Image (tube, coloured by chain):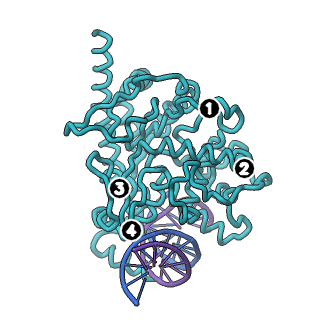
Chain colours: A cyan, B purple, C blue
Amino acid sequence: MSSSVSREIDSRDSAYCRKEKSLGVLCSNFLRLYNREDVRTIGLDDAASKLGVERRRMYDVVNILETVGVVARKAKNQYTWKGLEEIPWVLEQLKEEGLRENFNATICSITTRVSNDNEYKGLLGLNTTGDDYSSGSSKNKNKRDKSLALLTQNFIKLFLCSDVDSILLENAAKALPGDADDATALRTKVRRLYDIANVLSSMGLIEKIRHPDSGKPAYRWLCWRGKANNKVDAASDVNEPKMSGFGTDITNYCFKRKREVTEVDCKSSQERSWQTHDGLIELEPNSDGEEMKQHTKHLPKAIEFGPFAPISVSKVEDAANKRARQIQDLENLASTYRPQYRNQALCDLFTHYMEAWKSWFVDAVGKQQMQRIC
DNA sequence: TTCTCCCGCCATTTT
DNA sequence: AAAATGGCGGGAGAA
C-alpha cells in the first residue's frame, strides 16, 4: 500500500524505526512541549509540525489527553492546555461514573488474577451510554460517544472501579461496550486499546507487564485508584481528599522499583491519603514571578506526579520523606534499572527525569531539614 | 509465528 | 464546497 511505499522512501533517508513513531513517544513529546507555564492554547497544525507528525496523529493523542482532562478542545484546530493537575479530578469523575455504571461488576470477569480465565460470563449489562461526560455536564458532549475517547474512558474505568492487578487488552476489549461477538470489530478494538495503552503508559498512568502465570502482556494501573474500589463503602468517600500516588513513577523503565514504590503507594495511600495533609504540596511561584495557574488553588492535597508533573507543583515535602526512606541510593537505582529503555528517546527522557528528580530530591530534603531546625 | 500498532484512506461532521 | 475530524483495518515491524 501507499504506507509501505512511503516507509520505503523514508528508509532511504534514515532508518525507519517504528518505535520512534509510536503514539506513546508522540504523547511524551507533546507533554514535554506543552507542559509549561506559558502555554495556554495549542494549535493542532503547530503541534503537528513541531512534533514532526501528520495531523491525523495529533487527533489520536489529543483525544486521549482530552479524556483525562489535560487538554480541552477550544475551537477548530485549537486546544486549551488544562494541565496535568486536571487528571486526578477527571479520574475521580470517571470512577464515580464507572461505579454508577456497574463497571465494578464487569471487572470481576476479566481479572487476570484468575489464571486461565477465559470466561467472560458476567459481562452483563454494561452501560453503553458512556456519553454523559461527568455529572458536571458542562462539556459539550455531542461527539463524546466517539470511539477513541469513549474507549479511553471505559478502559480507565475498568481499572478505577476494581482492584484487579492487571488487565489483558483482549479481555478489556471483550468486556467493554461494543460488539463482543464480531471478531473483526474486536480486533479493531484491541488495536485501539493498544493505542490508548501506549499513551496512558507514556503518562505513567499504567504500565505494561507480563502476567506471571500466562506470560501474556497485560496492563497494570499505577496511579490513584480511589478509596473504596468495588467492594467497600462508597459513602464515606464523599468529602475527603481523594488523590494520592498519581503517576507515582516513571513509565516503562523500572518494574522492580515500581513494585517497591507503587505498591506501597497504591496500597497504603488508600489509608494515607484520606488523612489531611495540609501543606503537603507546597506551591511556589514560578521563576518568572508570574502568579500560579488558576488550577493550583484547588489541587488535591496528596498527589505524587509521574514522569510529567504539573509545572505548578514544585515541591512535595512529605513525599520526599517517604522517598528518602524508600530510596537510599539514587545513583544505584538509576544504574540498576536504566536498561529497561530500548528506545533512545526514552533513554534521554529517563535521564532527564532522573536528573530533575535528583535535584528536586536534594532540594526537598534540604528544605525539610531547614524547617526542622527553624 | 504471533503480537503490536503505525499509517493513511475515506466517511462523517463542522465550518 | 472545503476543511476538519476521526473510524477503521491492512499490513509491516518487533518479539
Q: Which of the two discs, 3 and 2, labels the residue nearer the N terminus? A: 3
The secondary element bearing badge 4 is classed as loop
In the picture shown, does residue A331 fall above or below A201? Answer: above
Q: Name the subunit of mark 1.
A: A
Tally of numbered discs: 4
The secondary element bearing badge 2 is classed as helix
Kind of residue at disc 3? Phe
Q: Residue A178: x and y, percent?
A: 68, 64
Q: Name the subunit of mark 4.
A: A
Q: Are marks 2 and 1 on the same chain?
A: yes
| Residue density around tag 2, few if under 14, some if 14–19, many if 20 or more, within 10 Å | many
According to the picture, the residue beneath numbered tag 4 turns out to be A76
Are circles 4 and 1 on residues that touch, CB within 8 Å? Answer: no
The residues bearing labels 1 and 3 have C-alpha atoms spaced at a distance of 34 Å
Q: Residue A199: x and y, percent?
A: 46, 55
Query: Looking at the rendering, in which quadrant would you find the C terminus of chain A?
Result: top left
The residues bearing labels 2 and 1 have C-alpha atoms spaced at a distance of 21 Å
**Nearer the camera: disc 3 or disc 4:** 4
The residues bearing labels 4 and 1 have C-alpha atoms spaced at a distance of 38 Å
Q: In the image, A215: left or right of A254?
A: right
Q: Name the subunit of mark 3.
A: A
Q: Give the residue furthest to the right.
A: A121
Q: Are marks 1 and 3 on the same chain?
A: yes
According to the picture, the residue beneath numbered tag 2 turns out to be A106
The secondary element bearing badge 3 is classed as helix
According to the picture, the residue beneath numbered tag 1 turns out to be A237
The residues bearing labels 3 and 4 have C-alpha atoms spaced at a distance of 19 Å
Kind of residue at disc 1? Asp
According to the picture, the residue beneath numbered tag 3 turns out to be A30
